[in-house]
Amino acid sequence: MNVMNIFESMDYGLSPESRTEADQWLENRGKKFGHYIAGAYRQSTKPNYFTTYNPATGEELAQIASGTKGDVDKAVDAAVKAQKKWNRIGGYQRAKYLYAIARSIQRHARFLAVLETLDNGKPIRETRDLDIPLVARHFYFHAGLAQLGDTELSDRIPHGVCGQIIPWNFPLLMLAWKVAPAIALGNTVVLKPSEHTPLSSLFFAEILSQVNLPAGVVNIVTGDGITGEHIVKHPDIHKIAFTGSTSVGKRIRHLTAKDNKSLTLELGGKSPFIVCSDADLDSAVEGIVDAIWLNQGEVCCAGSRLLVQESIADIFLAKVRKRMNDLRVGSPLDKSTDIGSIISKKQRNHISEMVALGKEEKGTVYQPQLPLPQNGFFYPPTLVTGLTPSSVLMREEIFGPVLVSMTFRTHREAISLANNSKYGLAASVWSENINMALEIAYELQCGVVWINSTNTFDAAAGFGGYKESGFGREGGWEGIDYYTKPKPPKLPVQARAKSRSKLVYEKEIPESLIDQTPKLYIGGRKVRPDGGYSLKVFNPQGEIVGTVGKGNRKDIRNAVEAARSASSWKQASAYNRSQILYFLAENLAMREKEFARRIELQTMCDSGEALHEVRTSIETLFYFASWADKFEGRIHQVAARKTVMSLNEPVGIVGVVCPNQYTLWGFVVMMAALVSMGNRCVVIPSETSPLSSTDFSQILDTSDIPAGVVNLITGYHDDLVKTLVEHEDIDAIWFAGCSTQNAMVNKMSVGNLKRIWLLENNLNCWYNQKSGYYKECLKHSVEIKNIWIPFGE
Amino acid sequence: MKKTHFSETHTPDGFNPSTIDSRDSTQDKLVPIRAQNTGSELDHGLIAEIQANPTAIIHRANTLKNRRSVKSHWQTAWLLKAITLMDLTTLAGDDTPGRVTRLAAKAQSPVSMEILQKLKVEKCNLKVGAVCVYHEMIAPALDALKGSSIPIAAVSTGFPAGLNPFDLRLAEIKESVSLGAQEIDVVISRRHVLTENWEELYDEIKLFKEACNPAKLKVILATGELVTMRNIAKASMVAMMAGADFIKTSTGKEPVNATLPVSLVMIRAIRSYFELTGNRVGFKPAGGISKAKESLQYLMLIKEELGTKWLSPGLFRFGASSLLNDIERQLEHQATGRYSASHRHPQG
């Protein structure tokens, strides 16, 4: 190349990163890999290999063992064997291993960056400047957490063996997000990398051997979705963490329904990128480059849905198009490449089909005329404008370098359009007006909001979604809760005999002996059940002690609508919520004897026991009144001139199914926790002894709690639970009903991936606020939203 | 209605913002390009709406460095380009005709012929963009540069503080121009920016521009003293509206001089102004740029944000004194494969 010609053209030319060392490593390993189990590479039980390719060239990189059930069993056995000791050695010892891993990642930083780029097709700039530094950062952070856990988390214990399944878009980073917290907190791991990108995980296994991590603490089994299912179904795995598509996430929810494994799902998104008219538009354009053209747009939290204020839309979109012309699509190993290769032909075809659909939907498609490499699966940066909220492209995840766009008139409309999605992972908000930016951030239903920035990450700040983007948080203090569970109390609380009273359908019994008005409590009013039937309540000896309304699915529907209308409860001040809970306690205390008598009548328990339950309920109301204005978020320290505000937000509308034992307290503890954090609830009271809950509606009436915040639907659980759990406008279910229904509840929640919490087995441990379980209620009452606020003028 | 007056009130050449999305070359057909900036009316509304988000700007400037890379032949060519874009500068109280003569000699042969031969570019007639001196040094510089076609730039208007009586500042410009300076680097009254008195700033620069004719007007904003990105963005726009042919970061005498983020703000202002009026205004970062690697980063910034067309002496200059030596060392390394030492290259 002639220097004088370049002097005229001022082209960038070629600037390839060397792949020699990565090739050498593959060569040394014979380009063939087994599983990493119990501290060494093992051959598969029935050797069967698949190929991993370089998507940018199509070349074969290596043969990878396809994990069978036998392989998974072996890995789980190794993990089980290692777990007790790994937990016992203590936080400081574990911290030393995590620190060694972090250091080793840094020592092999460039090698790992090259290997990742070869296997995944993303630009070397990203693996070098983003992926690998964040991997090291994650292990450093969790080394610290391991040590601090001994003192700071003494009330929690690890789950045991965690099954972890990670995607191909950030292979090693997702490994770090999964493995670091799990092993820091005393779990052991069986991890499956994506079949598209196993190589960095396999090199990571060598790092583990180098740092002498005890055998079995981390096991890596390679394979595709079938191998993944073996992991998900394995009975000795108590925790599944998955990052990937929403459809696979739903399948995992289904597969784990029966054995009720703890689940963390980090799924898809269609994250809004909101540009207000007062934004720094040039900076917002660069934000878009980072939002949707990072990693070819194959990012779960990609800012793929541009919402731009109508008054600046033309100017802004013109700037975006101009910027697109200067993007460089090409060899991922070239240091000047912006956009590398899509992961596979299948994925590229999917992207093409979606863009074609966008044209059919009357979208205007813009693709700059950029030279694309001949081989590999490259796709140009794409902008589709002129879409509407009903366009498929506006609603479905594309997972490619395709930005779709729409306009809004006011920031309120931007909020409503942004939330008009089944997803809720992340959002980016561009405005120079802090009032507006923070209002938008506060109102968005998603786990991460970046103000005037995008796609920034740090191990100290949690990451995870709302709605169908999954549940659980990864990173930060908030990530701990998903790799630990509360320690059971040392002295088991005396279990009370299960209630023997039962409900009988009115037709089957003689005319009512007791005159009472059977009603439900919906939207702050006592209403007749839609079906017009009532049920008699019997004590264990078969004597009638009262009647209640027989709720049906329409009553559930009405209750959910009432709860939805009570949205102002979220805005109520914490002080206000606290006062109302105190007032509930005060009013219950005034009627203490009456409530005790009712418990006694229904359950035929000892009168002292009944009075104790009422007093415990009053204490419980006090407890959550105390926390209402104290269960606060955090400020994460991530970088200079950047504040990350971690907020505890109410989950939303929660369906509550009460236990048959603890007829009053079982209701009060769940309702009080949820209400204290600003949730609204639709409660199905105890099936056999519902009268304490229905009596409580009078207390609700006299305690200034807004209409619709608490709704009560009595009736047969078999009639009501299914409707409640399947309801798409309910965000979570707390189920303390009969545990035989647990699996069904898990399964039926799949529709909108509502958060499920099954409590029945814990109730005896709970009946005491000192047990630590009350705190669990608070944690389940909130979603954590991290708002990134860069500052500085 | 926000910002749309970009398209409504500022289309003197029939320029239509909807064509921004076409490539640079297409724009040339639509917009007549002038040798000098004709300026425009001061548009208060536009100035008021200028936004510059500092953290996002810093992020872009920092990551851009790693988004592009030039190696081997390309690096050689880019470094040679950097030399041709350099205002070789001496602005010291102890400048003498002898010192300026040395500098002028270096300006005409910035890299030793031996290295140029090894790089096979000996026929390129390499020289710097301009020589930049104080008024008193214009005459010796003229003598020393005779026949070279290298323009002389003179700093003016009470450089560096710019607080001399206004009529003397105008007189200083005129005197330098009449002596033969082809470019005048003026300093603005920072107080007009700090008090957001855009009218005064506009009028001041407009008078400088008139006094400057036919020389080019390079307006130094002294960004280190304007403090905020928004101030810098607004001052840049006012200066261009008043007719600045170049906007320049610093005198080299402020505590903070040229930085990539500040440059990005000014470059984006230049781009907006071009889209608005069709006038191409030049950019000159000055002060603190002393490493070859930094000079490449600036060139990348310009190429990415303004386009390759701006990488020419008419539209971009480095204000630098020690940068050349580091570039020479890098070029020798490119030529021989051995790392070089400062003393191997003739002093300026």
Image (cartoon, rainbow, N blue to C red):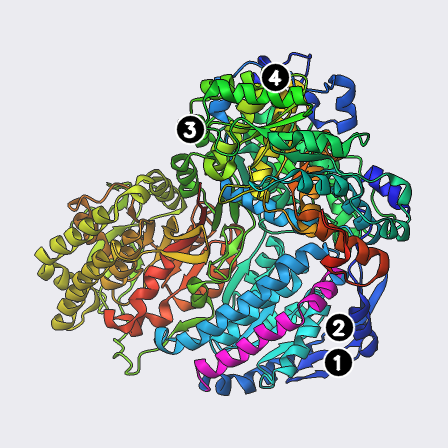
Q: Is residue A583 left or right of residue B279?
A: left
Q: Which residue carries the number 3 mark?
A: B191
Q: Chain of mark 2?
A: A
Looking at the image, is A129 positioned above or below residue A727?
A: below
- Residue B65 visible, this orientation: yes
Q: Are marks 2 and 1 in contact (CB under 8 Å)?
A: yes
Q: Amino acid at mark 4?
A: Gly
Q: Which mark is residue B39?
A: 4
Residue A500 percent coordinates (x, y): 27, 70
Q: Residues within 10 Å of mark 4 (few under 14, many from 20)?
A: many
Q: Are marks 3 and 1 in contact (CB under 8 Å)?
A: no
The alpha-carbon separation of the residues under discs 4 and 3 comes to 22 Å
Of circles 3 and 1, which is in front?
Answer: 3
**Which stretch is magenta?**
A89-117
Q: Are marks 4 and 3 in contact (CB under 8 Å)?
A: no
Q: Which residue carries the number 1 mark?
A: A44
Was residue A95 drawn as part of the magenta stretch in this picture? yes
Q: Amino acid at mark 2?
A: Ser
Q: Amino acid at mark 3?
A: Arg
Return the residue nearer the eye: A408 or A192.
A408
Q: Residues within 10 Å of mark 1 (few under 14, many from 20)?
A: many
* Image quarter of residue B239: top right
Of circles 1 and 4, which is in front?
Answer: 4
